[in-house]
Amino acid sequence: MLKKIAILGATGHIAKNLIERFCRTNKYELFLFARSLDQLNKFLKSIQCNDAVSSRMFSDFSCADYEVIINCVGIGDPGKLKTEGDSIFRLTETFDNMVLDYLESHTNAIYINFSSGAAYGTDFSTPVNEFSCTKLDINHIASSDFYGIAKINSEAKHRAMANLNIIDLRVFGFFSRFIDLKAQYFMSEVISCIKNDEEFITGKGNIIRDYVHPHDLISLIEKCINKPAFNEVFDVYSLKPVTKFEILDYFAQQYGLKYSIKSNINILTATGTKDNYYSNNKKAEKNGYFPQFTSIDSIIEETKAILS
């Protein structure tokens, strides 16, 4: 029988990758939940995914039985985080609590929740590892702290429910053919400049990012799905991170990207400055996760799909 998987936030960036790749197999029956079913069904049609898939409103969530629930709901776009920071907490709590309420009567179900590297706080002067601690100036909480605090809250709640099968996956960077080019992600802006033949303007700092390949991310998810009951959190990482100027030089050479460096540019940092936004915490290896692709591999492959 097909394993029944519910995906919340099915029109999101990561969710689209899960849906597209799960639809290629004959292993899953997908229950997809989104605010806009028109937008969701349009996407399903574009990837020719109609078998063993049903589109549903969030209000129908408790009306079926699922073996796995994957929560992709969240605000990731730095632009939206900057303007909608006060909604981060309620959005996170609403859908997380909805799943937790479901687990009370379906204790064998597996809950996979997408967290973020922002749970480590805002200090990324060096990459994080298994000994890193989150630092918070409790008397001067800034708007750049909101997103990370929301993720910490949900992770802490999940660890307190040690009897339930809950896995949090901290994603630091993700780029794919389904990215919203209107969003204010670094890679969205780079690709948009290429498509529109515009100059990309950046600061002089050579930040480091880690873009996990969709294949590797889904490999980790399937390992979580197929493992006996457990309650854990894993950092998600690629085979190797990449620097900003490695990315820009690649696009300059391969696609003719024009870019310039300005020292006084105001970079959008909705969740704080992150010079080394990646993790050396390889605890996921204990779950059999060994990524096959580097960050630049993911960028090269997914860019070809976008620009073709």
Image: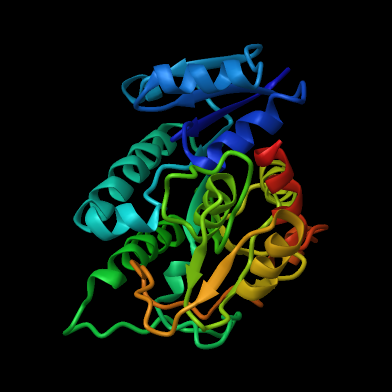
Q: Quadrant of the N terminus?
A: top right
Furthest residue toward top? 51
Residue at point 40%, 52% (across, down): 77
Q: Does residue 265 sit above or below 152 in this rendering?
A: below
Q: Nearer the viewer, residue 12 or 25?
A: 12
Residue under the point 78% across and 57% down: 297
Residue 34 seen from this side: yes
Q: Nearer the viewer, residue 94 or 279?
A: 279
The structure residue drawn at horizontal position 38% and vertical position 77%, both measured from the top left corner, is 265
Point 75% across, 25% down: residue: 24
Q: Position of residue 233 (x, y in %)?
A: 56, 62
Q: From what the image shows, is residue 236 above or below residue 181?
A: below
| Residue extending farthest right | 292
Q: Where residue 12 sits in the image (x, y, percent)?
A: 47, 38
Residue sitting nearer the eye, 115 or 101:
115
Judge from the rendering whether residue 272 lies leftward or rightward of residue 129; answer left or right: left
Residue 178 percent location from the top left of the image: 58, 39
- Which quadrant of the figure has residue 61? top left
In the picture, the quarter occupied by the C terminus is top right
Question: What x and y, as percent, mark residue 37?
Answer: 40, 19
243 relative to 263, above or below? above
**Location of residue 85 (image quadrant):** bottom left
